[in-house]
Amino acid sequence: MKRVLTSILILPFLLSGCQTSEPEKPNIIIIMSDDMGYSDLGCYGGEINTPQLDDLAAGGL
């Protein structure tokens, strides 16, 4: 009986150390532009200089 009672008292302390981490949120970027085609970007051979979008295109999936 004493062993069961001791186990019941110790179990919550042992389980309190078991924490689960929250899943990471995905990184999502939404870019909205008006009157722009895919060939307007520098990474697709366009004449417009778009260094930030070129970096995103080079490092993306």
Image (cartoon, grey):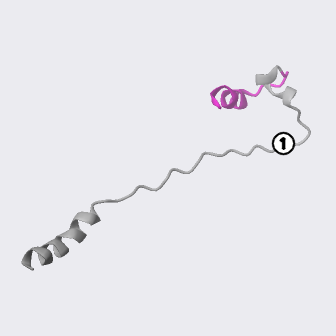
Q: Could you say whether the residue bearing mark 1 is in a helix, strand or loop?
A: loop
The quarter of the picture where residue 18 lies is bottom left
- Where 2 sits versus 15, above or below? below
Q: Position of residue 26 (x, y in %)?
A: 59, 47
Q: Residue at x 89, y 42 (%)?
A: 34
- Where 48 sits versus 1, above or below? above
Looking at the image, residue 11 sits to the left or right of residue 45; the answer is left
The C terminus, quarter of image: top right
Q: How many marks?
A: 1
The span picked out in magenta is: 46-61
Q: Position of residue 53 (x, y in %)?
A: 72, 31
Q: Nearer the viewer, residue 40 or 6?
A: 6
Q: Looking at the picture, which amino acid does disc 1 mark?
A: Ser
Q: Is residue 47 magenta?
A: yes
Q: Residue at x 24, y 71 (%)?
A: 12
Q: Is residue 38 magenta?
A: no
Looking at the image, residue 20 sits to the left or right of residue 16; the answer is right
Looking at the image, residue 14 sits to the left or right of residue 19; the answer is left
- Where 49 sits versus 9, above or below? above
Can you identify the residue that label 1 sits on? 33
Q: Position of residue 47 (x, y in %)?
A: 85, 21
The N terminus, quarter of image: bottom left
- Where 60 sits versus 21, above or below? above
